[in-house]
Amino acid sequence: MTAGEVRDTSGSPTDIVLEVDVAAPVERTWTAATDWDRQGEWMLGTRVQGTAQGGQGVGGGIRAVTGVGPVGFVDTMVITGWHPPHGAYVKHTGRLVRGTGAFEVRERPGGSTFVWSERLDLPLGALGRLGFRLVRPAFLWGLRRSLRSFATWTERH
């Protein structure tokens, strides 16, 4: 595997599990992954607009907007698990994005692996599942690109 290659280990149409190796120690990767205010520097089309409790610890929160120009959506999250430097677990509480997510960092020889996972509760029942099936390839393309950027960004900071 080459540096920055993103692996997809997703299990179902509404689960997303992507991982990327980072040539940085666990602690640096963790710090980069949980620096919510700077997430827009590597996450395509996303800007964090605020955090509760600084986005740190159980009960903390994150408010992000994802989109291009005037078209986008708000993604609010509450931190449900906080285990530095290995895992931050969230519950999505927005109108459009609901479900759970995880940001995990695993040690590996020569650095760390960053794992981004989502288990989505799609709105609108069957219509929502069909709609997500249509947008999933574009969503995964953007997330893969973002994770490659994350690896490079983390290695440089």
Image: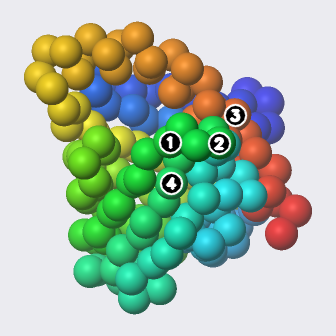
Q: Residue 127: x, y in percent?
A: 19, 15
| In the rendered image, the vertical position of residue 76 relative to residue 134, given as above or below | below
Categorize mark 3 by other alpha carbons within 10 Å: few (<14), some (14-19), many (20+): some
Per the model, the C-alpha gap separating discs 4 and 1 is 7 Å
Q: Residue lying at the far right in this picture: please name it.
A: 156
User: Which numbered disc covers residue 145?
Assistant: 3
Determine whether label 4 and label 1 are within 8 Å by CB: yes
What residue is shown with label 1? 72
Mark 2 or mark 4, whichever is nearer to me: 2
Mark 3 or mark 4, whichever is nearer to me: 4
Per the model, the C-alpha gap separating discs 1 and 3 is 18 Å
Mark 3 or mark 2, whichever is nearer to me: 2
Categorize mark 4 by other alpha carbons within 10 Å: few (<14), some (14-19), many (20+): some
Question: Could you tell which of marks 3 and 2 lies nearer the N-terminus?
Answer: 2
What residue is shown with label 2? 69
Which residue is at the front of the view, 50 or 79? 50
| In the rendered image, the vertical position of residue 107 relative to residue 8, given as above or below | below
